[in-house]
């Protein structure tokens, strides 16, 4: 999921439970978006728009970084 977010393929729906979409399709795990936000890996959705781009936080980018 994080790789798809990093590639700009994901959108996050605003609402009581953020819905993650990849390539315009809702993923089967409807709680994945919420878990990514709660874990601090993806920024919370902008509540002013119903659907916006999913964006990695610094912690999300670090999670994708290769081990040193």
Image (cartoon, rainbow, N blue to C red):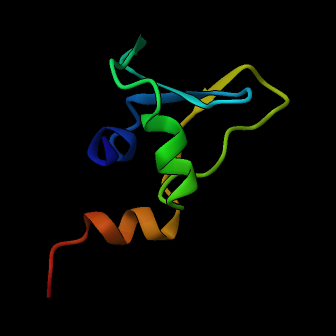
Q: Where residue 4 appears, x then y in whole percent?
A: 31, 38
Q: Is residue 12 left or right of residue 23?
A: right
Q: Where residue 12 appears, x then y in whole percent?
A: 57, 30
Q: Residue furthest top?
A: 25
Q: Residue at x 48, y 46 (%)?
A: 35
Q: Where residue 34 appears, x then y in whole percent?
A: 54, 40
Q: Where residue 50 appears, x then y in whole percent?
A: 73, 19
Q: Is residue 24 left or right of residue 34?
A: left
Which quarter of the rendered picture does the N terminus lie within?
Answer: top left
Q: Residue at x 45, y 70 (%)?
A: 59
Q: Residue furthest bottom?
A: 68
Q: Nearer the viewer, residue 35 or 45?
A: 35
Which quarter of the rendered picture does the C terminus lie within?
Answer: bottom left
The relative height of residue 19 versus residue 45 in the rendered view (above or below) is above
Q: Nearer the viewer, residue 41 or 34?
A: 34
The relative height of residue 57 versus residue 2 in the rendered view (above or below) is below
Q: Residue at x 16, y 73 (%)?
A: 66
Q: Residue at x 78, y 24 (%)?
A: 49
The relative height of residue 45 versus residue 25 in the rendered view (above or below) is below
Q: Is residue 44 left or right of residue 3?
A: right
């Amino acid at each position: 999921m994080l790789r798809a977010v990093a590639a700009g393929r994901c959108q996050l729906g605003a609402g009581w439970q953020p819905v993650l979409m990849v390539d315009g399709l809702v993923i089967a795990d409807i709680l994945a978006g919420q878990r990514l936000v709660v874990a601090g890996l993806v920024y919370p959705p902008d509540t002013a728009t119903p659907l916006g781009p999913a964006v990695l936080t610094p912690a999300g980018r670090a999670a994708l970084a290769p081990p040193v």
